[in-house]
Structure formats: structure tokens, C-alpha cells
Image (cartoon, rainbow, N blue to C red):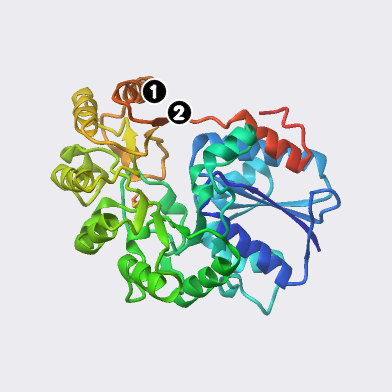
Amino acid sequence: MKIYFASLSPCNTRKVNARQIIDFIKSCGHEILENPKGADMIFVWGCGFRNDWREFTFAVIRELKQIYKSSKIVYTGCIFPGKFAESIKKELDVEVIPWKDATKKIEKILKEKTKDLYSQKLNLIEDKIVDNLEEYRKANPHAKVWFEDEYIKLNICEGCRGYCTYCSEKLMFPKFRSFPEEDIINQCKELMKKSNSKKVLFLSDSSGEYGKDTNSSLPKLIKRMKDEIDKDINFGITQINPEHFWENKEEMFALVKDGTIEYMNLPIQTANDKTLKLMNRKYNSQQIKFLFDKFKEYGFKNYSTHLLVGFPGEEEKEVEENIALLSNYQFRHIIVSAFMNHPAIEASKFENQISDEDKKNRVLHYSQKLSEKGITVHSDLGGISNRMMENIRIKLDIPLKNI
Ligand code: SF4
């Protein structure tokens, strides 16, 4: 078959999974096209976690159906499974395969009887895109690049073993697994022979849990990569839950202090103990303060965190307390996002839901107050950037007039 694969995913972490499906399709003898014209089948990898991206993905699928009438459309990616996927299938009248259930269903739709997607070797690594982000942006003002693109990106594990009550992503993930350490080491070794970068960014949904299922750990992996690949590698780490940093704190602090870890994303969501409990986050405000005080003591500022605003029961004094605490520290940036409700998540059943208007005002309040303290804030009130839409319109050759 002639197959076109449209990846409408806003995050770097899922690229490895889209790559795996594309490699699997090729390994089954099908041709991957450069654009959707003449495709027998069009796969759309979309993001069902964020409301804005979900609506955008649906709009793209509707337009693809209108224009490429003879192509079979398959919607896959981060999608709520079960009855939610069934209702999307009815609404869009396309095949819907949540990534969580991709194994077996992708084989079936490709009529593949001998190979299975799960055994398809994962291409875990992607070379850096830019040497220096600021210089690149000056030279290419419309380029869609982010500081993560200064790094070699290396996926180390997928899924998560946590049960945060606000989390919808977890419901879309397959079972947690660390990727084979030999593959991580060998693929990084191979790429670094060609790349002039020694900066590696670990991508995952829950980096701190790496190795829990393979008798390894994040500090062990880092030490092994420095021993076996290059002693001068510096690491960036995405999505490390403070709970898991704490579990390995002596080793992790040592790696921060000696500069081996040069960037970290450590989502705290809030520093309010009552709300952390309701969120089912396994750390408290004292531990957050201890972590940030240590980073301050080491002069380590190149870390970011997330604040989740408008969680059910959140009081305005909690917002002020968080601002007061965070104003004592320096961050690379803070991402402030509004709590996104969905019937599939536990917190949707909690009392004291906060109105969208109040959530929006609190996000803006955080943004203003923290910016006044010199902290870079990325406030996420949803919405797809025009630049992103333009990129996808051109790539798919569709008008995107229904957006
Ligand atoms: S740790 Fe992150 S991915 Fe895991 S359940 Fe919590 S919010 Fe979701």
C-alpha cells in the first residue's frame, strides 16, 4: 500500500513512537509517501490530551477526509481508549487506534500476519537541530525551534507508574517500560561519532522511573554513558517527578553539583501540601524547598518547573503562597497551565471545581507576578500557534479553513 503518515504531535517525547510505527509500516513492505496525494491509507498521529490539540486534530482529519476521499484515514496517537475512542470513531467516521492499544490493531489494519509492532526496533535518538538557539532564531525568525533542539534527544523510557488524579496522559500510555539500556548506549555512541554535540537530553514521560523495571536507574545510566561513551557528556532531563529525584537524591545532587546534569525539568504542580495530597503527588512543600535551596546553594539555575492552576479546591491564598515561595529562586522558565478537566480523570469527580474564567485569571496572575520577579513564565492557556497551523497546512496541502 501507499501510506502517508501525518504527525500532529506537539511534544518531542512521542516522536519515537511515531517513528516506530513508520518503520514498522516500511518493514511490512508498504511505501511511505512524502505527501497525502495518492495515498491508499493516511495515518494521523494526534494529541488527545490537550483540548486545543484534540479539536485541531479533529479539524485536520475532517479536511483530509474531504480532500482525499479515496484514502482510508487512521487516527492514532495519545487517545483516551475504550468508550472514548469508540465515540471519536462514530463522530469522525474514521478508524481510531489509541497508541495504548496500537499493538495488534496496527498489524490488523495493515493485514500483517507475521510481524508485530511491539518488536519493531525503536529508533531512540535524534541529533541536535541547532548549535545555539538564540543565534539560530536571529538568522531564522520563523523557525519552529525550542531550547531542547540544542540537544541530542534520547528517549529512555515510556509510560508512567504514577497515579496523579489530574492526569489524562497516563490513561493514554501503554504499560511503563524502560528502553533496553544496550540500545540507549549503542545508539547514542553511534550518533555521537557523527554529531559535534556532547549535550544529551533524556526524553520520557517519567524520567526518574528509568530502570525501575530493568534493575538500573537514572544515575546508573548517566554514569555508564560517561564511562562508555564520553566522560564530557552533559545531560538535560525532562519530566523528572520530584518524588523520583528524592529517591536518588544523594547521587542526583552530586550530578547537579559537578555540572553533569546541566538542565532539568522538575514539575512540582504546586507547593501546597493539601493540594499535593489531592493530586496524589508523593512529595511535600518541605521537600520542594529543600531541593530548590540545594540548587540555589550550587548556583544551579538551569531548571524549569510546571504549575498546574485551578485544581479542584485550590484557594487563592495557595496561589499567593506559591508565588511567594517561587520568588526566592531562579529558574530557566516556569510553565503555568490551567487544569484541563475530562470525564476520564479522577479529579473530574472532585468537589469545588474552579471555573474556566477563574483558571484563566489565575494563570495570568501567576504569569504577571512571577515575571515581575524576573522569572520567565510560559503561560499555557491553550490554542495552536498560527505558525504551527501554517506548517501543518503546507505539509498536508490542506486549506485548514474549518479551524
Ligand atoms: S507522573 Fe506525570 S505522567 Fe505520571 S501520572 Fe503523574 S502527571 Fe501523569
User: Is 263 situated left or right of 182 in this image?
Assistant: left
For label 1, the SS is: helix
**Residue at the bottom extreme of this rendering:** 114
User: Is 220 situated left or right of 31 in this image?
Assistant: left
User: Is 281 situated left or right of 239 in this image?
Assistant: left
Residue 289, how many percent across, how many down?
Answer: 17, 42
Q: Is residue 264 depicted above or below 274 in this figure?
A: below
Disc 2 C-beta below 8 A from ligand 1: no
Q: State if disc 1 and disc 2 touch (CB < 8 Å).
A: yes
Q: Residues within 10 Å of mark 1 (few under 14, many from 20)?
A: some
At horizontal 40% and vertical 59% (from top left) the residue drawn is 234
User: Is 276 situated left or right of 97 in this image?
Assistant: left
For label 2, the SS is: loop
Residue 31, how many percent across, how many down?
Answer: 79, 64
Residue 70, how many percent across, how many down?
Answer: 84, 49
- For badge 2, the amino acid type reads Leu
Determine which of the numbered discs, if any, sits on residue 360 in the image.
Answer: 1
Q: Residues within 10 Å of mark 2 (few under 14, many from 20)?
A: some
Q: Is residue 160 depicted above or below 187 in this figure?
A: above
The residue beneath circle 2 is 381
Q: Which image quarter holds the N terminus?
A: bottom right
Determine which of the numbered discs, if any, sits on residue 401 in the image.
Answer: none
Q: Is residue 248 visible?
A: yes
Which callout, 2 or 1, points at the residue further toward the start of the chain?
1
At horizontal 18% and vertical 28% (from top left) the residue drawn is 321
Of residues 330 and 241, the one nearer the viewer is: 330
Q: Which image quarter holds the C terminus?
A: top right
- For badge 1, the amino acid type reads Lys
